[in-house]
Image (cartoon, grey):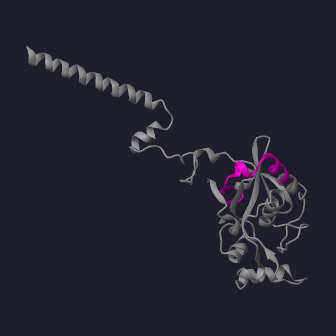
Amino acid sequence: MLGSCRTLKSRLESGVLRFGFALAAVACAALPGCEQRQASGAPESASSGVRGASSIPASVGELRDGDIAFHESTSRQSEMLRALTGSRWTHMGVVFMQGGKPVVLEAVSPVKWTALAAWTARGRGKHYVVKRLRNAEARLTPEVIAKMRQVGTRWLGRPYDSQFRWQDDTLYCSELVYKVYDRGAGIRIGRIERARDMNLDDPRVEAARRQRFAGGRFDPDEQVVTPVSMFEDPQLITVREE
């Protein structure tokens, strides 16, 4: 009789446990992302909200004013720029929010606003990377963002600078971004180099230089700032890659 009671008690406890596990599984299945955690047997990564940025918290997936977007341009001069700088990143712009949607301030021909979706569609394979200044919440205050926007807006309509000169009447992409940050926020992203520091001996670069400076003088000491120098700046962190 005592043995039968113990057996009955064991079966009841086992049934309660199975019911408890089943109830927990049902509850878990109702939670977003829980199925993935169960399959892997490991906790969900905090970076799962940001595609291609495994060390970035999901909260940074939303773009903000002042973010910097990069892609590999498919324009005619992209191959020359890759040869000149040794980098795939040949175009960039500054992100600002307009009507709750991200737009890119970019220097093409002319300097203009471009919706992010249209901007990314022009990149090779529609692949792009967005970076953000570290401690942006503290450094890019609403007042600073307003000044950056003001600096960039006054250059709308200016032509693209195919000779990469350090002046304001014509602008190239990385020069625009550098000056918006420098003059609007007092922050310098990337590094100023000289034209002579670039890969000027490449045949594609040499051909472009002869064409663009046919009626003028090429200055090897001209100041330049490249997309790759800004992309690699440790002041920036990646917040989105698609």
Q: Residue at x 74, y 52 (%)?
A: 139
Q: Nearer the viewer, residue 58 or 215?
A: 58
Q: Residue at x 70, y 51 (%)?
A: 136
Residue 145 is situated, as x and y percent measured from the top left of the image, at 80, 50
User: Image quadrant for the N terminus?
Assistant: top left
For this view, does 62 lie left or right of residue 218? Answer: left
Q: Is residue 113 visible?
A: yes
- Residue at the far top in the pictured view: 1
User: Image quadrant for the C terminus?
Assistant: bottom right
Residue 72 is situated, as x and y percent measured from the top left of the image, at 68, 64
Residue 199 is situated, as x and y percent measured from the top left of the image, at 70, 81
- Residue at the far front in the pictured view: 138
Image vertical order of residue 152 relative to residue 202, above or below: above
Q: Nearer the viewer, residue 115 or 221?
A: 221
Task: Tell me the quarter of the picture where residue 219 sits.
Answer: bottom right
Range drawn in magenta: 121-147
Question: Does the magenta segment cover residue 70?
Answer: no
Image vertical order of residue 186 relative to residue 60, above or below: below
Q: Is residue 117 visible?
A: no
Task: Tell me the quarter of the picture where residue 195 sits.
Answer: bottom right
Q: Nearer the viewer, residue 1 or 153?
A: 1
Residue 133 is situated, as x and y percent measured from the top left of the image, at 69, 56
